Image (cartoon, grey):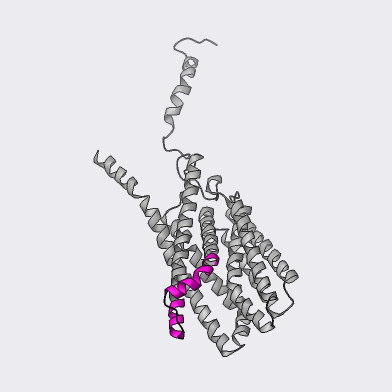
Amino acid sequence: MSKQPGSSTAAEPDQPATEPALESPTDETTGPAPAGTRLAHAPGALVLAVLSLGWLAAMLWSTRAAITSAAAGVTAISLSAYALPGVITAALVAGAAVALAATNRLGRATLRFLAAVGAGLLVGLAAAVAVNLTYADNATTNTIAGTTAAAAIIGGAMAGARNARVVGGLAAATLAAQVFVVLFSRARDPLSDLFGAGDTQQSMLDAAKWVSRTESLLAGLIAGLVAYLYLAWARRRAERRGGVADQVRWPGYLVAGAGAGLLLLLTEVIIRIGGRGLLDLAAALSEADQVAQTALGTSRVDNGIWVLFVGALTALILFGRTLGPRAVEDEDEFAS
């Protein structure tokens, strides 16, 4: 075939040079990617799952040690009712973290949710079997095993949410807050003296109230800080890998920061439904036990509300501080 300057074949070598100019500078590689893509996964999910399982095992072991060390069955019932909230919260976090690690790379929403529930079910079954095999055979064992399994399944279902990074931040914040609460227990007696606990019952109650509020305030601050740090780390990690999709907006930081308080309130719901028999049994031991169980229930609800709001505000304030320099740059560009 002839390749004269005026023929159509002579223009073919020039086509590759002009075709890239037809592409839009804002193609799909720079726009938001659909949810569930590889860029939307939660970093550090496997480490978080291992830590959460270790924390759940520690809570189950400490509860068993406290129950078996009790000299009488009445004391064991009271200790079981007292330790149950910590075990339930740990099971919620463990179920969510393990399910998050198992479904981190899945893209389809339905498949992700089913796999997350299945992972939570496995954690719950393992915890229930461990309780039945290692705890004493009494009336409280089945209650602890059943509520722990239910909490793990619910936690797994939460991990099937659309934004995995928010779930990861929520789980990390709750785990950090729970570890702090256990460590804070060693400072309760000195703080009670600092807040004026004396020989009268009223002074002891007032001091206990201030100690509880201090604990809730600090736990909320830690939860909000950890949630923000996790989401900020996930954002920077995605940017280093060239990912700009599914950036977490302020509602994500709000939910992650409030997550520890939300799980504490959810723990109370699970206890009052699945563990109602154990609470009633502990309250029926004596009039003092009934007053104590009522006061503990009210204190747990108040603690959850404090942690929820303080954690949410802390995460939002920290996130808001990152918006200042960007707003100034936008104003400078508009003025120019």
Residue 186 lies in magenta, yes or no? yes
Placement of the N terminus among the 4 image quadrants = top right
At a point 48% along the width and 9% down the height, the residue shown is 4
Q: Where 14 sits versus 250, above or below?
A: above
Q: Quadrant of residue 52?
A: bottom right
Nearest the viewer among 39 and 79 is 79
At a point 61% along the width and 78% down the height, the residue shown is 81
Left or right of 16, for residue 59: right
Nearest the viewer among 270 and 289 is 289
Horizontal and vertical percent for residue 145? Answer: 68, 71
Q: Is residue 255 visible?
A: no
Horizontal and vertical percent for residue 38? Answer: 56, 45
At a point 69% along the width and 61% down the height, the residue shown is 122
Q: Main secondary structure of the magenta part?
A: helix
Image: magenta residue range: 182-208
Horizontal and vertical percent for residue 2? Answer: 52, 10
Q: Residue furthest bottom?
A: 287
